[in-house]
Image (cartoon, rainbow, N blue to C red):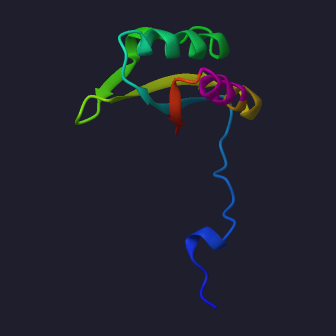
Amino acid sequence: MTQTPNDVDLPRPKIEFPCDYSIRIVGDAADDFVEAVSDVVERHAPGFDRASVKLSDSRNGRFQSLRVMVHATGEAQLDALFQDLKATGRVHMVL
């Protein structure tokens, strides 16, 4: 039987903390999406630079993608951030 990428458990990439960590957040387009996401990010990464947020709209304008850079101190911080972003109900993906 041939293994496909979905059949193989790949190890998570090793991240050396602390580090600057780029996160992509995708959700429904709305006037306050950037502000709502930035509020969550700032709770987990104090000192987060809101001016550095990069916004992209989807081709049809239905979704927005944000690219943010945070100073990550550990896996627990990133896990909590990802969970809180998803808990907003406005975020579809966190990459």
Q: Residue 83 lies in magenta, yes or no?
A: yes
Q: Quadrant of the N terminus?
A: bottom right
Q: How many marks?
A: 0
Name the residue: 28% across, 34% down. 58
Q: How far across and down, in percent of the image, does residue 50 sit?
A: 44, 10
Q: Quadrant of residue 55?
A: top left
Residue with the most extreme bottom position: 1
Q: Quadrant of residue 3?
A: bottom right
- For the residue pair 89 and 9, the one nearer the viewer reads as 89
Name the residue: 60% across, 20% down. 88
- For the residue pair 42 and 72, the one nearer the viewer reads as 42
Name the residue: 50% across, 11% down. 36
Q: Quadrant of residue 20?
A: top right
Residue with the most extreme right position: 76
Region in magenta: 80-88
Q: How far across and down, in percent of the image, does residue 21 sit?
A: 55, 31
Res. 48 in view: yes
Q: Relative to 85, is 48 above or below? A: above
Q: How far across and down, in percent of the image, does residue 41 sit?
A: 58, 17
Name the residue: 67% across, 53% down. 12
Left of 62 or right of it: where is 28?
right
Q: Relative to 62, is 52 above or below? A: above
Left of 56 or right of it: where is 43?
right
Res. 22 in view: no
- For the residue pair 13 and 84, the one nearer the viewer reads as 84
- For the residue pair 50 and 33, the one nearer the viewer reads as 33
Q: How far across and down, in percent of the image, does residue 76 sit?
A: 76, 30
| Magenta stretch secondary structure, dominant | helix
